[in-house]
Amino acid sequence: MKTYYGKNRQCIICKKSIKFKNIAEIKFENVIEPKNVLTTPYYFIKCISCNHIFCEGDYSRKVLKLMYERNHDVTIKNRGKIYSSIVKFNLSHLLEKSSLKVLDLGGSDGSFLEFLSKEKKIKNIADKTVIDLVDNLSKHSGIKFLKTDLNNAQLPCNFNYIFCIHVLEHLKNPRKFLEKIYKISNNFYMYIEVPSTELLEIHNTVKLVTPYHVHYFTLKNLIRLSLEIGFDIIKAEITETDGVPRIKLLVEKKNNCESFLKYLREEEKRDDFIKRNIIKKTKKKIGLWGIGHEFRRIMEKYPVLKNHLNSNNVMLIDVKFKGKFYNGKKIYYLNDLKKFVDEIIILPMLEDTRASIRNQAKKLGFKRNQIFDPYSTYIH
């Protein structure tokens, strides 16, 4: 595929108009009605500067209406499991507000807000509003609806908790959209969820590459975008629910946001600390536990680690990805762990996940000095 200079095109992540690369082309033949077939080509483009991937093609109002209006109310399998995961991720911050005024962007039929209302621990919801293109709220009471195209939405300003669940990947300009949200109010939380393509190398049971998805985010680029706009990062993770790899990000609008450069400096120091410890510890038999986004990011950042990964002294462990392979090396379950390894290195970033791994390791008979958690050990 060819590499070319952007023609008045600016990357929504790094805002540079430099080189872009065509990485794929597909014909989008989505039959919504027999007489409506989209056959125009769509191109997947990568920014050479920050590696952000986006889809380019016909996203005119007419095409967007054809894509979504007739195909909008898609049934979500295991909806309760997915919603429970979102509520758990946000729960402590939802409880902070004495009076919750909740806005669900792209909330379709209001089913998530209905689910949220029935959560026994949450008794402080004063206002519930959905903004979307199609009004499907007839079966839910107590939820307001504002009909608009989110690409050009005029947003209300009286909310203190916003949910933006699988919306950004569908928008033509997510940066402009987030900038608009940032300006509407002060002191609010926003939960953002988008598909993650970063785990597909290991966990590729779903097809996420489609012209329905205009943008393809990495966790780092989504954090970068949020910080540059002015949000504080509260918590972030990449996980899998119901077979779909998901980036989860909770941000807050305050007036004392850290700069992106500070974030990058801290990340660089911590990553170097993790790299040095993996190299040092692979001289004996170790288990790398947690083969998800953070593991993959570290391995891609430091190619030298892949040489150590191929050592017979290294065992990859992950409950979800057991039996799969990373870089030709098999990922194992917990059964033979204690027989093989002398020490465990915990690699997920999320504290809840690390705590769970520590507890499982202790139950398997590992002592405290045999469990290395670099995120807890690293001193800023």
Image (cartoon, helix red, strand yellow):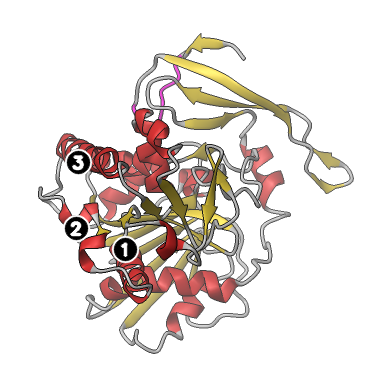
Q: Give the Cα separation between the discs numbered 1 and 3.
A: 17 Å
At 44% across and 78% down in the image, what residue appears?
Answer: 116
The label shown at residue 38 is none
Q: How many marks?
A: 3
Q: Which residue is mark 2?
A: 376
Left or right for 327, reference 346: right
Whether the residues at callouts 1 and 2 have beta carbons within 8 Å, the answer is yes
Q: Position of residue 130 (x, y in %)?
A: 48, 66
Q: Earlier in the sequence, mark 1 or mark 3?
A: 3
Q: Earlier in the sequence, mark 1 or mark 2?
A: 1
For the residue labelled by badge 2, is the local secondary structure a helix, a strand or a loop?
A: helix
Label 2 is placed on what type of residue?
A: Ser
Please say whether residue 3 is one of the residues in the magenta stretch: no
Q: Position of residue 232 (x, y in %)?
A: 21, 51
Q: Which residue is mark 3?
A: 273
What span is in magenta? Answer: 8-14
Label 3 is placed on what type of residue?
A: Phe
